[in-house]
Amino acid sequence: SQQGEEDPQALSIQEGENATMNCSYKTSINNLQWYRQNSGRGLVHLILIRSNEREKHSGRLRVTLDTSKKSSSLLITASRAADTASYFCATDPRGYSTLTFGKGTMLLVSP
Amino acid sequence: AAGVIQSPRHLIKEKRETATLKCYPIPRHDTVYWYQQGPGQDPQFLISFYEKMQSDKGSIPDRFSAQQFSDYHSELNMSSLELGDSALYFCASSLGPTGGMGEAFFGQGTRLTVV
């Protein structure tokens, strides 16, 4: 199965609310990254958290990483309609030069 | 700032035809990755190159081949196309050797439709 598994698969919230997406993975990693994808468009890098980091912030984004549980979460605060997109976590398994993507969470933010 | 350039953006081919997708990485990036994303699916890693040598191989069919050229651009060659090859094909580049990919920058993708 996938290295990165995300939940929920779909999330529908109102503008101004916070959105939390979770990701679990299986193997040891060098880092974990979150990407955003608008429908049928390219993948946009949001944030990278290294295996020795526990939390990272970037604007309205907050990412946590728990390597003991092999899980990460992405929190988007004060969501906006423009945040509507699919969000993928991707792991960089130790020893490989690839990014392995999870199945993604489709976020819908309604005005 | 220059981004990853992929061409063409859209491609329509018939079954059993051949397609070539091109990727121009960000200048000075030495690593290129190819991904395939089917409708509603997550991106699947196909193959990667570091300094013009194949670095890692994922779920790339034998009908596909790829290479990275001396100017670091890469081409994905797809032969005997099947309907199931219809997908978005992404190229990404990064600055970094194998293991520890760091931040990867993705192109806008090539949408391949096989009819």
Image: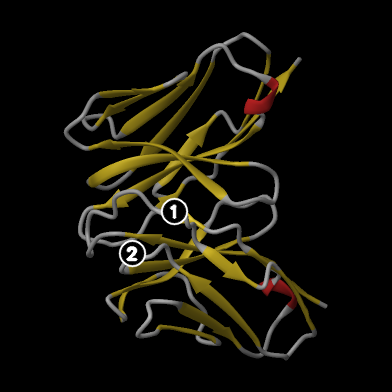
Residue that extends furthest to the right in the rendered view of this protein:
B115
Q: Considering the numbered disc 1 on the image, is that residue within a helix, a strand or a loop?
A: strand
Question: Which mark sits nearer the N-terminus, 2 or 1?
Answer: 2
Q: Give, as a three-letter code, the residue at label 2.
A: His
Chain identity of mark 2: B
Residue A73 lies in what quarter of the image?
A: top left
Q: Position of residue A2 (x, y in %)?
A: 44, 51
Q: Position of residue A17 (x, y in %)?
A: 60, 9
Q: Position of residue A82 (x, y in %)?
A: 67, 26
Q: Are marks 2 and 1 in contact (CB under 8 Å)?
A: yes
Q: Which residue is mark 2?
A: B29
Residue that extends furthest to the top in the rendered view of this protein:
A16
Left or right placement of residue B87 versus residue B2 in this view: right
Q: Position of residue B41 (x, y in %)?
A: 62, 52
> Distance between the Cα atoms at labels 2 and 1?
10 Å
Graded by Cα atoms within 10 Å as few (under 14), some (14 to 19) or many (20 or more), the crowding at tag 1 reads: many
Relative to A43, does residue B65 appear above or below in the rendering? below
Residue A33 lies in what quarter of the image?
A: top left
Q: Residue at x 24, y 46 (%)?
A: A29
Q: Which residue is mark 1?
A: B105
- Foreground residue, B55 or A105? B55
Q: Residue B55, labelled with which disc?
A: none
Left or right placement of residue B41 versus residue B45 in this view: right
Left or right placement of residue B19 versus residue A43 in this view: right
Chain identity of mark 1: B
Q: Residue at x 58, y 68 (%)?
A: B6
Left or right placement of residue A43 versus residue B81 in this view: left
- Foreground residue, A63 or B84? A63
Residue that extends furthest to the left in the rendered view of this protein:
A52
